Image (spheres, rainbow, N blue to C red):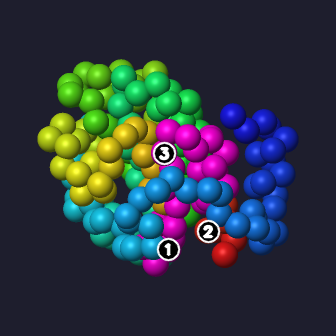
Amino acid sequence: MLSRRELLLTSGALLIGCGPAKLPATAPSSLLGKPMPKIRKRRTVTGARVGTAANQNKITVVKFFAKYCEPCKRTLPAAERLHRANRDSVLLIGVAEDEYRAQVEETIKLYGLSFPVIHDRGNVLIGRFRTAELPATFVADASGRVRWVGGPKQSERDLHDAVAYLQAN
């Protein structure tokens, strides 16, 4: 978890045009460097509709998670902080892989998630993103290319640094 001091220093660096010098280490993925798979408008758990097609010229983060996933418990708070700090410049979409909607709703409530969450009950999106383990986080630059992938071994800070790097470059 980022300390308050680290968060302020990184935010300040972004404001003056500096960010991490390079992307953090990425998890392996056949999607790296390729266009992010499109998510057509889908209904979120709250009933809104969200998709990636209309999100031109913004960094896009798609985060796959599930209630039963132990590493997800570590990464969801970081994703929420990222969303709250970057609402206007980053689209973050959560994709829940739980079997039951009630499990998804419990996770949203437990972590106070304010970003849109899609319940991928049929595992359509996780298949489209070629994901075999959770958590999985895909970060695309403003042109829509996947530039960083987070897996179970990436730290909370890695997602933040990947987005900060793309914002600065």
Q: Provide the residue span drawn in magenta.
A: 140-163
Q: Which quadrant of the view contains residue 95? A: top left
Where in the figure is residue 16, as x and y percent of width and height?
82, 69
Q: What amino acid is labelled 2 in the image?
A: Leu
The Cα–Cα distance between marks 1 and 3, rounded to whole angstroms, is 21 Å
Where in the figure is residue 128, as x and y percent of width and height?
24, 57
Q: Secondary structure at mark 3?
A: loop
Q: Earlier in the sequence, mark 2 or mark 3?
A: 3
Residue 142, disc: 1
Residue on which disc 2 sits: 166
The Cα–Cα distance between marks 2 and 3, rounded to whole angstroms, is 18 Å
Locate residue 51 relative to residue 58 in the image: left or right: left
Q: Is residue 24 above or below residue 126?
A: below
Q: Residues within 10 Å of mark 2 (few under 14, many from 20)?
A: many
Q: Residues within 10 Å of mark 1 (few under 14, many from 20)?
A: some
Q: Where's the N terminus, which quadrant?
A: top right
Q: Secondary structure at mark 1?
A: loop
Locate residue 103 relative to residue 24 in the image: left or right: left
Q: What amino acid is labelled 1 in the image?
A: Ala
Where in the figure is residue 25, as x and y percent of width and height?
62, 56
Instruction: Please check the rendered image and state whether residue 32 is part of the magenta-colored stretch, yes or no.
Output: no
Q: Earlier in the sequence, mark 1 or mark 3?
A: 1
Residue on which disc 3 sits: 151
Locate residue 154 relative to residue 132 in the image: left or right: right
Q: What amino acid is labelled 3 in the image?
A: Gly
